[in-house]
Each structure stands twice: as structure tokens, then as C-alpha cells.
Amino acid sequence: MNFLAEIKEAVINGNTSKVQEITRAALDAGETPQTVLNEGLIPAMSIVGEKFQKGEFYISEMMISARAMYGGLDIVKPLLLNQKVESKGKAIVGTVQGDLHDIGKNLVCMMLEGGGYEVVDLGINISPDQFVAAVKEHKPDFVMMSALLTTTMAYMGKTIKALSENGLREQVKIAVGGAPVTQKFADSIGADFFASDAGEAVTKANAILALK
């Protein structure tokens, strides 16, 4: 029985109970938590991200798959913590000040966790000062900001400015995303990269870490 292939299929189909059942069976059969994560759960979410980018999956389907991935992650995470497995990197994620939308942000958090990152989810309506405080506290590799309103996009630039004024800008790579956000806007405020969706956010973060 190919447990890893079955885990991937169950995640893509969004079947949480089956993901958990096969994850437990794989571990009982001797697969390591790291293998289940790196060869089952993470590749499945990569495929889901690709399907979303191609228009084969909608946000609702992507979120159902992400929840199924979390079902498996909940089982392997405590075992990975016991093994002191190092994360790829750390990301702070938040929706900017004045914006209360969280679906896109939540997807980015799920995809990052599924991709092996340590994630600090700051939530919604996060001010530049709160981003600054979080960077000081958590010392992340990435700061990822989301906005769904054109009226709140300005806070992305204000947050980058606040990080610069506090001497923190060079310590982090900054990503921006959300429905009204474009590459042109990202360039204009000095962000390091723009991601059009959660899958792209992980892909670009991986590419940046590969250059370090």
C-alpha cells in the first residue's frame, strides 16, 4: 500500500478523515513523520496550489484541501516537535490596518505551514506599529501582508516605511498580496515580492531562501 500517494490524493480531494486515517496507518507502518510531511502533505498542497493557479480549483476547494492537510499536520506536528525538526524559515503574516478580510491570509498561513515554515499569524487590522513589534519579537525571515481593499493598500507602504525607520527593513523579506495588489504596486512601495495567490507566496519564499 502506497500510503504517501493515498495521503496526497486524500488531501487533494479534501477528505480530512481519510487523510488522518492514512497518516496514522503510515506512521504505524513505520513511515517517519518527516516523510509523511515532506512526501505526502507538502507535495499535495503544491499540486493544489498549481490547480488553483490554472483555474482548476476555486478558493473554496483550495481551503477544503488545506483543512484536510491540516488534519494530517495535526497528527505529525507533535511528533516533529519531539524530533526538533528545523523549519525552513519563519514568516509573519497579517492583514493590514483597516482591513478585516482573512480568507487570503488564512490560506497563505496554511500553505506556508504545509510547506514547512514556522508561521506567526498576526490576524486582521494590523497596524504598522504592530508589524514592527512582531518583527522585533519573532525575528522572522519574511513579513507577508494582505489587503483586499484599495483603501487599505496604503498601509502596506506605511508598514515598510515603519520597518525602515526602526532599522528592521534589511532583516526581512517583504511580500504583499490580495485582490487589488499588483506587481507594479509592490515595486512602488519597495516590497521584495508580490504573490497573486497562496501557492505563489510559498514558491517565491522558497526561491528566496534558496538564494541565501
Image (cartoon, grey):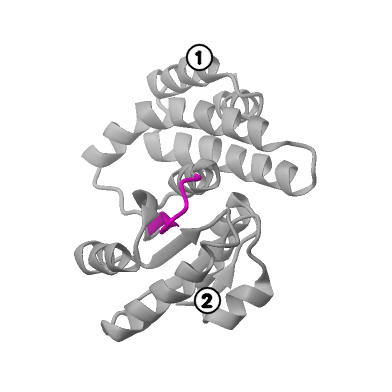
Q: Secondary structure at mark 1?
A: helix
Mark 2 lies on residue: 192
Q: Position of residue 194 (x, y in %)?
A: 60, 67
Could you tell me if residue 209 is visible in this image? no
Image check: 142 left or right of 12?
A: left
Q: Position of residue 126 (x, y in %)?
A: 36, 57
Q: Position of residue 10 (x, y in %)?
A: 61, 23
Tell me, yes or no, whether the highlighted magenta stretch contains residue 58: no
Q: The magenta stretch spans which residues? A: 92-101
Q: Amino acid at mark 1?
A: Ser
Residue at x 47%, y 61% (from the top left corner)? 145
Q: Position of residue 80 (x, y in %)?
A: 30, 39
Q: Is residue 73 above or below residue 169?
A: above
Residue at x 33%, y 35% (from the top left corner)? 77
Query: Which numbered dot is residue 17?
Result: 1
Could you tell me if residue 198 is visible in this image? yes
Q: Amino acid at mark 2?
A: Asp
Asked which quadrant contains residue 88, the reply is: bottom left
Q: Nearer the viewer, residue 146 or 170?
A: 146
Q: From this viewpoint, which residue is outermost toward the right?
A: 55
